[in-house]
C-alpha cells in the first residue's frame, strides 16, 4: 500500500516502521497538545544545523535552515491526496484502536485528525524572515503570537514560508478528500 502512495525512500522508510499506527496516533494526538513527540519524526529530520542570520538589525531564521526541509516538503506536497485518503480509510480501524489506547480524550482518531489538519491550515504564514531570539542556547520566535502557537504549528513555521504554504496546500487537499471519502 505504501508503494502506491510514494516511491520516496525517505518517506517509505518511515511509513514502513514498526508500530506505525501508534506513532501516527501519537503525532495526531500531540498536534494540539503542549508536546509533539518529535522523537517519532526523527527519521524525517532534515540534516544540517539550524542557522540564523542578521538582517536589518534583527536575528532571523536563515534561508539555509528552511531549505533543509524542502526535500521532504516536496515529497509530501507531491503525494496524491486521494490515494493518501484511501490508504487512511483502509488503516483507519488500526489508527482508531491505537488512538483510543494512547489518548485520554473521547474524540475518535478521525475527529482528532481533522482538528489537527484544521489547526495546521490555520497557522499564520508570514512573507518575510522569521525573527527569533536566542535564550539558553535555543531560539524562540520573537513574536509572542507565533511563540504562543502549538508545537505542531511552530514546527510547520520552521520549514519556512514557501515550504509551509506547500504543506498547507497539501493539507487542504487531504482535508477535502476526507470530506469526499466519508468513513465506511
Image (spheres, rainbow, N blue to C red):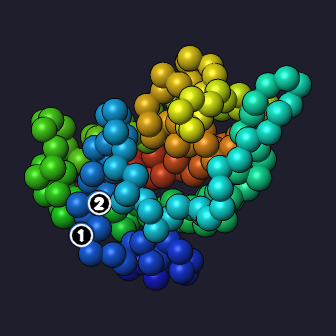
**In the shown orientation, is residue 137 left or right of residue 100?**
right
Residue 3 point in image, percent of width and height? 46, 82
Closer-to-camera residue (118/163): 163
Q: Which residue is mark 2?
A: 23
Residue 129 rendering spot, x and y as whole percentages: 77, 33
Furthest-top residue in this view: 144
What label sits on residue 19 in the rendered view? 1
| Visible residue check, residue 113 | no
Residue nearer the viewer, 104 or 89: 104
Question: In the rendered picture of this protein, how many numbered marks are placed on residues?
Answer: 2
**Quarter of image, res 1:** bottom left
User: Which image quadrant is residue 23 in?
Assistant: bottom left
Query: Residue 25 appears at what percent x and percent y?
Result: 26, 53
| Label 2: which secondary element | helix
- Relative placement, left or right, of 118 versus 137 is left
Asked if residue 100 lies left or right of residue 84, the reply is left
Q: Nearer the viewer, residue 90 or 27?
A: 27
Q: Marks 2 and 1, how far apart in space? A: 6 Å
Amino acid at each position: 500500500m505504501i508503494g502506491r502512495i510514494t516511491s520516496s525512500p525517505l518517506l517509505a522508510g518511515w511509513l514502513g516502521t514498526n508500530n506505525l499506527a501508534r506513532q501516527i496516533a501519537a503525532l495526531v494526538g500531540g498536534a494540539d497538545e503542549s508536546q509533539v513527540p518529535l522523537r517519532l519524526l526523527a527519521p524525517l529530520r532534515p540534516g544540517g544545523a539550524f542557522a540564523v542570520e542578521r538582517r536589518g538589525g534583527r536575528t532571523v531564521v536563515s534561508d539555509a535552515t528552511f531549505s533543509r526541509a524542502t526535500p521532504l516538503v516536496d515529497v509530501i506536497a507531491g503525494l496524491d491526496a486521494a490515494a493518501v485518503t484511501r490508504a487512511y480509510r483502509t488503516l483507519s480501524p488500526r489508527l482508531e484502536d491505537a488512538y483510543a489506547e494512547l489518548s485520554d480524550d473521547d474524540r475518535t482518531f478521525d475527529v482528532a485528525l481533522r482538528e489537527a489538519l484544521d489547526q495546521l491550515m490555520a497557522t499564520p504564514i508570514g512573507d518575510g524572515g522569521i525573527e527569533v531570539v536566542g535564550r539558553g542556547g535555543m531560539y524562540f520566535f520573537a513574536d509572542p503570537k507565533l511563540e504562543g502557537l502549538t508545537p505542531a504549528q511552530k514546527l510547520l513555521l520552521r520549514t519556512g514560508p514557501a515550504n509551509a504554504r506547500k504543506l498547507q496546500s497539501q493539507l487542504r487537499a487531504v482535508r477535502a478528500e476526507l470530506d469526499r471519502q466519508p468513513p465506511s
